[in-house]
Image: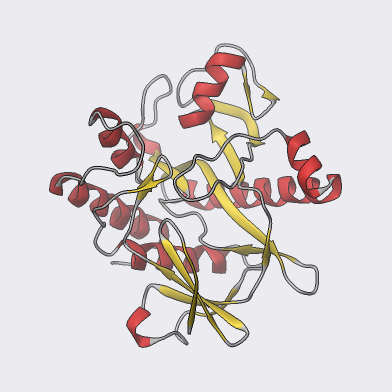
Amino acid sequence: MELLHSGKVRDVYAEGDDLILVASDRISVYDVVLPTPIPDKGKLLTALSLWWFEQLADLVPNHVISATDVPPEFAGRAIRCRRLEMVPVECVARGFLTGGGLKEYESTGKVSGVELPRGLVEASILPEPIFTPSTKAPVGEHDEPMTFAEVADKVGAQTADRLRQVTIDVYCRGAELAADRGILVADTKIELGWAPDGTLVLGDELLTPDSSRFWPAESYQPGRAQFSYDKQYVRDWAARSGWDKRHPAPEVPADVVDATRARYVDVYEKLTGNRW
């Protein structure tokens, strides 16, 4: 195997015509990798992604070849994948107003160029899910919001339309399935790429705590921060820590690590119905 790329949380190897995508226990916030891993995180994200790929297989094809035909040292945290020509845009769908979208709305009344009604507050449900893409920044740099027009300029109008439709479709299906299990999907980021035959294919991870914000429906209340089954807990700790959000990041306290792992396990079990 040849190491092709070591990302913020994933490593990509080449083996013949296939790729081996390995999910580490690294965690990143504000586009900076923290020095403290979250135990089992890579295996949890891999298992949850595989579950989602199966749930959405009739909606959009995915890159998975095998979850078992992988090197033994990566068992449980790796997927054998098809090679794709990845789209140079982060595809994000939002159904609720939170995070960077909330900050943008508060200053402009828009998110990624999408005009929203006045009077929305933190965690407000949006009139309909919106496509809020961003740039793909190199490691250590921050992704920047893009308008739909900017995406069209980058990849062409037809491809931009397709990216928006697939992203919204994936979000809506995921949000519907999660809602049946008591989980609200506030937003999600997906990765799309082109297969050699021209098919648009889901890659990377899908609807995990690293790529989405998950909230318990039973305690949802707009106008305040929500309990999150995702890395928002680590983001909140980082924001309180006095860290300047630049490399190098500080070590994560043990209690924050333990609480974060517990949330990853909890949402995995609630969504899939499987015990970890």
Tell me where residue 110 appears, x and y as whole percent.
64, 21
Residue 75 visible here: no
Please report the residue visible at 60 percent of the width from the left and 34 percent of the height from the top.
145
Residue 222's spot in the image, x, y percent? 43, 23
Furthest toward the left, the residue is: 254
Determine if residue 183 is in view: yes
User: From the viewer's perspective, is residue 223 above or below residue 14?
Assistant: above
Q: Is residue 143 above or below residue 74?
A: above
Query: In which quadrant of the rendered view does residue 268 lie?
Result: bottom left
Seen from the viewer's position, the closer of residues 96 and 69 is 69
Is 275 positioned to the left or the right of 53 in the image? Answer: left
Percent x, y for residue 6? 45, 65
Q: How many marks?
A: 0
Q: Is residue 171 above or below residue 62?
A: above
Q: Is residue 269 left or right of residue 94?
A: left
* Residue found at x 52% / y 53%: 177
Residue reaching furthest to the top: 119
Q: Is residue 131 left or right of residue 210?
A: right
Residue 204: percent from left, percent from top: 54, 63
Q: What residue is shown at x 47% (from left), y 46% (from top)?
A: 212
Quarter of the figure with the C terminus: bottom left
Front residue (pair 230, 172): 230
